[in-house]
Image (cartoon, helix red, strand yellow):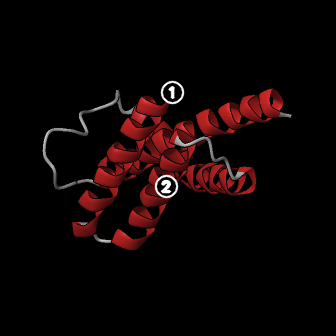
Amino acid sequence: MKVFNLILAVLFALFAIVQLNDADPWLWFTLYIFVAAVSAMAAFGIYRMWAIIVGMLICVVWMGTLVPEFINWIEMGMPTITGQMKATEPQIELTREFLGLFLAGTALVFHFFRGRKESRVEG
């Protein structure tokens, strides 16, 4: 698990760095660097459950604001969102944001369950 968590930490740190050229970099940089930090700590067996829960809640609420656009994208037949880096239509950017939140949230859910398992083993 240590190697997997370190890989997650590096990936999310890279995601954070890439966000620095975005229109709203600090929101995304903060989210991704937070997930990177949680992953790095998990690699060493450190789980701050309250922080993981807060992070999951932020992801869920933020995703909730994007659900209508994500559904709209699906109803449009899921046109490509990877054709070019610059989002020319709003649903491209909003769908990418939704999927980014999904990835971050999934990593946090993984750490939540792993942290619960680790605390049961130790306690």
Q: Residues within 10 Å of mark 2 (few under 14, many from 20)?
A: some
Residue 121 vertical placement versus 107 (above, below): above
Residue displayed at 25% across by 39% down = 81
Tell me, yes or no, whether the two marked residues, 1 and 2, touch with CB atoms within 8 Å: no
Outermost residue toward the left?
84
Q: Nearer the viewer, residue 112 or 73?
A: 112
Q: In this view, does 24 lie to the left or right of 86?
A: right
Disc 1 marks which amino acid?
Answer: Met
Q: Where residue 26 sits in the image (x, y, percent)? A: 39, 72
Residue displayed at 44% across by 51% down = 36
Q: Nearer the viewer, residue 82 or 10?
A: 10
The picture quadrant where one finds residue 121 is: top right
Q: Is residue 61 left or right of residue 81?
A: right
- Which element carries disc 2, helix, strand or loop? helix
Which residue is the site of mark 2? 37
Q: How crowded is mark 1: few (under 14 residues within 10 Å), some or many (20 or more)?
A: few
Cα gap from disc 1 to disc 2, whole angstroms: 15 Å
Q: Where residue 111 sits in the image (x, y, percent)? A: 61, 38
Q: In this view, does 4 lie to the left or right of 46?
A: left
Which residue is the site of mark 1? 1
Q: Nearer the viewer, residue 104 or 65?
A: 104
Disc 2 marks which amino acid?
Answer: Ala
